[in-house]
Amino acid sequence: MKRILIFLLAGWTFASIDAAVIDTIQVYSKSMQKNIPVVIIRPDNYTSVNELPVVYLLHGYSGNHLDWIKRDKGFEKAVDQYNMIIVCPDGGYNSWYWNSPIDPKSQYETFISDELVKSIDAKYTTIKDRTGRAITGLSMGGHGALYLAFKHQDVFGAAGSMSGGVDIRPFPNNWDMAKQLGTYAEQPERWEKNTVINMLNLLTPNSLAIIIDCGTEDFFFKVNENLHQQLIYRNIPHDFIIRPGAHTWTYWTNAVKYQLLFMKNYFDSSKR
């Protein structure tokens, strides 16, 4: 029989599904002056283990912190298999994980890379070093994971992307990005500065462990393939996975398995 336990204590929600334990907490963002809901998935033996590595797992456009546990039920078992913590923050409906120069309530770069990491390290028994932190996500979250990791290599040691919008410039009218940056026509410098493919100058070989995954029928396939070629040109080691698939949860429920295995291998190699 499937074991499901839920109880409330001091505003925290705890749920146990099979072995993994899921906490839903509120993390206050000083930069945005509001509480942000965050799902924490930890192994069943959490109380008996030493410091654990953390994977920050970001959702896509129009999603929220519950997407992964609702849309990919069962993936949470990876925390027991790999002995890690997974953190799924709410990144807003259309934040793209930037610090928006337009909307003061959308400062998600600061929240994820600073405020959230500090809060998780304070509340949980984690490895408080970049060698124990990885970040990945799907679509908008794939962009966000690479964007944040490239800019904050002192915080994250590994980064991944699933079907990520790694070059926003071909899509100037899509996914409310103009609400965060202004229109591409009026603010081209913001779009050029805040797209992942233009940030490769921040990388040096092996400074960051990177995995990129995209389906061949995905509307982001061409920009991901171009990112792959640009990384090769700059001699930046990375894993690049392509296979048949579109911009769907069917693809992502498979892709996340490769991402978490990659992160696990990175964490293990950092111990040597």
Image (spheres, grey):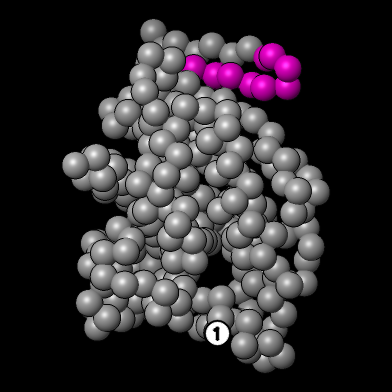
Q: In which quarter of the image is residue 247?
A: bottom left
Check if residue 17 falls in the magenta segment. Answer: yes
Check if residue 22 falls in the magenta segment. Answer: no
Q: In this view of the protein, which residue sits in the foreground, 129 or 31?
A: 129
**Picture quarter with the N terminus:** top left
Image coordinates of residue 144 in percent, x first then y, are 51, 61
Q: In this view of the protein, which residue sits in the foreground, 249 or 166?
A: 166
Image coordinates of residue 96 in percent, x first then y, are 59, 63
Q: In this view, does 102 lie above or below 189?
A: above
Q: Residue at x 33, y 61 (%)?
A: 208
Can residue 141 be seen from the camera position used here?
yes
Type of secondary structure dominating the magenta stretch: strand
Can residue 171 be seen from the camera position used here?
no
Residue 66 shown left or right of residue 150 in the figure? right
Q: Which residue is drawn at 63% across and 47% down?
A: 115
Q: Say which amino acid is labelled 1.
A: Glu
Residue 254 shown left or right of residue 57 in the figure? left
Image coordinates of residue 230 in percent, x first then y, are 30, 81
User: Where does the magenta region start and end?
Assistant: 8-18
Residue identifier under label 1 = 192
